[in-house]
Image (cartoon, rainbow, N blue to C red):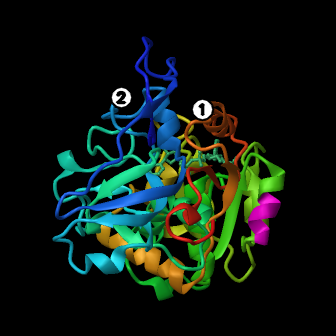
Amino acid sequence: MPHSLTVTKVEGKPGQVYYPLKLNEVPRPKPGPKEVLVRLHAASLNHRDFFIRQHLYPGISFDHPLLSDGCGTVVEVGSEVPSGSLLIGKRVILTPIRNWDSAKDGPEEPSKFGAIGGSVASPIGTASDYALLTPADFEPAPAHLSAHEAAALPLVGLTAWRALSTKILNGDLQSAAGRNILITGIGGGVALSALQFASALGANVYVTSGDPSKLERAKSLGAKGGVSYREAAWDKQLAALLSPSRPYLDAVIDGAGGDVVARSVRLLRPGGIIAVYGMTVGPKMDWVMTAVLKNVELKGTTMGSRAEFRDMVNFVREHQIRPVVSRVARGGLADIAGVDSLFEDMRHGRQFGKLVIEISAPEDESGAKL
Ligand SMILES: NC(=O)c1ccc[n+]([C@@H]2O[C@H](COP(=O)([O-])OP(=O)(O)OC[C@H]3O[C@@H](n4cnc5c(N)ncnc54)[C@H](OP(=O)(O)O)[C@@H]3O)[C@@H](O)[C@H]2O)c1
């Protein structure tokens, strides 16, 4: 019998509660005429999943499977799916969002927008052996990626892509070359995707981390340099790393919040951009007068549209980018302790990149390998 993982509701206040994982036996779904059945091979965690377990995320569902990111193989296709027979056996990555087609400013109907996974916005979640989808709900997986790497890409890749290409570069990818971009908290999934994308475009990427070994690993992935955000004077240390010919930052991509505006504004050029996609440290941050006087632009940025997702996957394919996988739990969905241990990695910030659950081996149904 196929399985799915959900969270069980227990009493407790948001931020204090920690919903336990629940393994469910579910029937193998049967695709309707316009639907496609995908056998999941791997899924990955995002910080939102940790927030869901703490009831710090909106629109939580206790019935729909957890997790937004997944890679699988098409195993059954409904009779009315265009060119359906050609899809059988194809490896795909799932679209992590619903109800945002292509509008640049945000979802066309914000109240209907949401990520898949433990959400009332969609019955789909990738912590499941099977997912019933429509063809709009996936993209072909880039052939150079393993199933683990493909499952590590969707949500973080989409978020990083929108922050960089839409919010900082305003669609002009060529303009990235030679710019100085700071990416904070480089151990995180979004941060690492942003590093990979910006480096591929020729930007000079600088990073912060709480762990010196992560700074070194970031350099091996193309970062020009990095500093520890645990150091009181990290902004001064970063200033010393910038080249004399371009002694300022053009932009910052931040997912932590905290003091990032106050610190980075000293290094930003006039009119520089701070794109903030998250506030892991706390739900508020300071906006300082120095930033106003420097005409700094603070831009909120979220996941992204369906169109941005397609562009991001094509960029990854074109530039042969491989998402960074921190650790894989190989016991499948039924190994709750193994899955829980990935959440513990996230709780303690031990990860460098994505935390992946291996769900099934592709050779089970397609002959491909992990
Ligand atoms: N708005 C959206 O649509 C959207 C989309 C994706 C993510 N997010 C949010 O963005 C945040 C990151 O997501 P993720 O999935 O990439 O998380 P993640 O993989 O769990 O990474 C979080 C990272 O935060 C960094 N961090 C912790 N304290 C920090 C500090 N004081 N200063 C700088 N960095 C710090 C750590 O970096 P080091 O390990 O290097 O120290 C850690 O690796 C989360 O809050 C998430 O909810 C929002």
Q: Mark 1 = which residue?
A: 336
Mark sitting on residue 286: none
Instruction: Name the quadrant of the C terminus.
Output: bottom right
Location of residue 42 with respect to 282 vertically, above or below: below
Disc 2 marks which amino acid? Phe
User: Residue 236: horizontal and vertical position, in percent?
Assistant: 75, 56
User: Residue 201: horizontal and vertical position, in percent?
Assistant: 57, 83
Mark 1: is the Cβ under 8 angstroms from ligand 1? no
Callout 1: 10 Å neighbours few (<14), some, many (20+)? some
Residue drawn at (57%, 72%), measured in percent from left and top?
Answer: 368
Residue drawn at (27%, 45%), measured in percent from left and top?
Answer: 122
Dot 2 lies on which element?
loop
Disc 1 marks which amino acid? Ile
Residue 104 visible, this angle? no
Q: Nearer the viewer, residue 133 or 343?
A: 133
User: Residue 235: horizontal and vertical position, in percent?
Assistant: 70, 54
Residue range (magenta): 215-220
Q: Nearer the viewer, mark 2 or mark 1?
A: 1
Q: Mark 2 = which residue?
A: 62
Q: Nearer the viewer, residue 309 or 166?
A: 309
Dot 1 lies on which element?
helix
Location of residue 70 with respect to 166 vertically, above or below: above
Q: Nearer the viewer, residue 37 or 354?
A: 37
Callout 2: 10 Å neighbours few (<14), some, many (20+)? some
User: Residue 194: horizontal and vertical position, in percent?
Assistant: 56, 66
Answer with left or right where residue 222 lies relative to residue 134. Answer: right
Answer with left or right where residue 141 lies relative to residue 37. Answer: right
Residue 219 in magenta?
A: yes
